[in-house]
Amino acid sequence: MKHIFAKYCTPAPPNKGDDPSQLLEPPDGAYFDAAALDAWASDTNGTPLSDEEKEDLLLLDVTDEGGLTYASTE
């Protein structure tokens, strides 16, 4: 799950694209901005999320600007 988050997050992981066989790790403080969330949704579901679906995500761990963060349950 971290690898998928890291593919779209801001800031990008330092090892992004260096070795395609290596799993990516999101850097501390990484988040999805609106563009990253749309890119992730389009890549996984074929379309961006609706405004209502994005609003539901605000109940999750987000930055002050509304960027979705990676909250590990590990």
Image: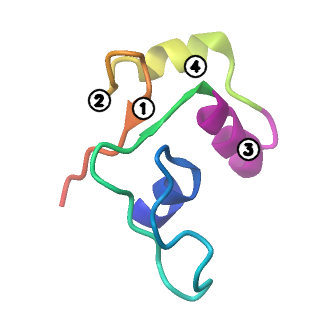
Mark 3–mark 4 distance (CA, rounded to whole Å): 13 Å
Which mark, residue 68? 1
Amino acid type at mark 2: Asp
Image mark for residue 38: none
Residue bearing the label numbered 2: 61
Q: Decide: marks 1, 2 in contact (CB < 8 A)?
A: yes
Q: Using the image, determine if residue 22 lies above or below residue 32.
A: below
Q: Residue furthest right?
A: 46
Q: Which residue is mark 3?
A: 45
Residue 40 magenta: yes
Q: CA distance from mark 1 to mark 2?
A: 6 Å
Q: Secondary structure at mark 1?
A: strand
x, y percent for residue 63: 33, 24
Residue 53 is marked as: 4
Colour scheme in use: rainbow
User: Neighbour class for label 2 at 10 Å: few (<14), some, many (≥20)?
Assistant: some
* Amino acid type of the residue tagged 4 in the rendering: Glu
In the picture, measured across the screen, residue 73 lies left or right of residue 40, that is left
Residue sitting at x 60%, y 25%: 34
